[in-house]
């Protein structure tokens, strides 16, 4: 069992121990708990009477309710350039660290051994080719931040120098 599954299991156990896991229609009640070697799932009642479905499988956690799907994935899920959103640059020679997705936005964190300034220049040129307009550019000796816009969406890009690598953060509204 990995870290994410352990956290999910701890949440379930906490709910059950606190009395929320007995099922029923009250807010916070947990139903349909299923635990296997690599997956955990359950349904929880929301305060408004709706239900949210929680699933954890491998290194991915997904919560689905009437508003949409919210997900968290770590680098073990295999998200790569082929499955990355087509209007964003998946930086070559980088590895996905984390992704968080909701109906309104996406957040991606990648890591690369390349210099942060080289990465920023690649994003400046490639994002323009993908139809994004650069509206803000800020740079200092350890990081670069760029805001891009496309139609009514915004993308906040930051790349920061780390010890021996660079961390790329991308936040995009849908």
Image: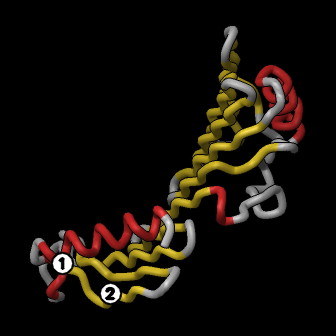
Q: CA distance from mark 2 to mark 1?
A: 10 Å
Residue 91: x and y in percent read: 82, 42
Q: Are marks 2 and 1 in contact (CB under 8 Å)?
A: yes
- Mark 1 Cα shell of 10 Å, populated few (<14), some (14-19), many (≥20): some
- Which residue is most to the front? 1
Q: Name above or below for residue 88 compared with residue 159.
A: below
Give the labeled residue for mark 2. Answer: 33
- The coloring applied to the image is secondary structure
- Quadrant of the rendered structure where residue 25 is? bottom left
- Mark 2 Cα shell of 10 Å, populated few (<14), some (14-19), many (≥20): some
Give the labeled residue for mark 1. Answer: 16
Which of the marked residues, 2 or 1, is nearer the chain's N terminus? 1
Tell me what residue is drawn at x 83 percent, y 62 percent: 82
Callout 2: helix, strand or loop?
Answer: strand
Residue 138: x and y in percent read: 67, 14
Residue 17 shown left or right of residue 64 in the figure: left
């Amino acid at each position: 069992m990995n870290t994410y599954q352990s956290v999910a299991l701890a949440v379930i156990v906490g709910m059950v121990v606190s009395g929320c896991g007995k099922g029923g229609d009250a807010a916070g009640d947990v139903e349909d708990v299923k635990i296997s070697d690599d997956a955990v799932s359950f349904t929880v009642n929301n305060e408004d009477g709706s239900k949210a479905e929680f699933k954890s499988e491998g290194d991915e956690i997904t919560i689905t309710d009437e508003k949409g799907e919210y997900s968290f994935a770590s680098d073990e899920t295999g998200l790569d350039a082929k499955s990355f959103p087509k209007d964003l640059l998946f930086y070559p020679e980088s590895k996905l660290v984390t992704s968080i997705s909701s109906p309104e936005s996406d957040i991606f964190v990648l890591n690369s051994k390349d210099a942060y300034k080289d990465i920023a220049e690649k994003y400046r040129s490639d994002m323009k080719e993908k139809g994004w307009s650069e509206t803000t550019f800020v740079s200092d000796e350890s990081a670069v931040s760029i805001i891009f816009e496309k139609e009514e969406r915004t993308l906040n890009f930051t790349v920061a120098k780390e010890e021996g690598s660079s961390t790329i953060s991308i936040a995009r509204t849908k």
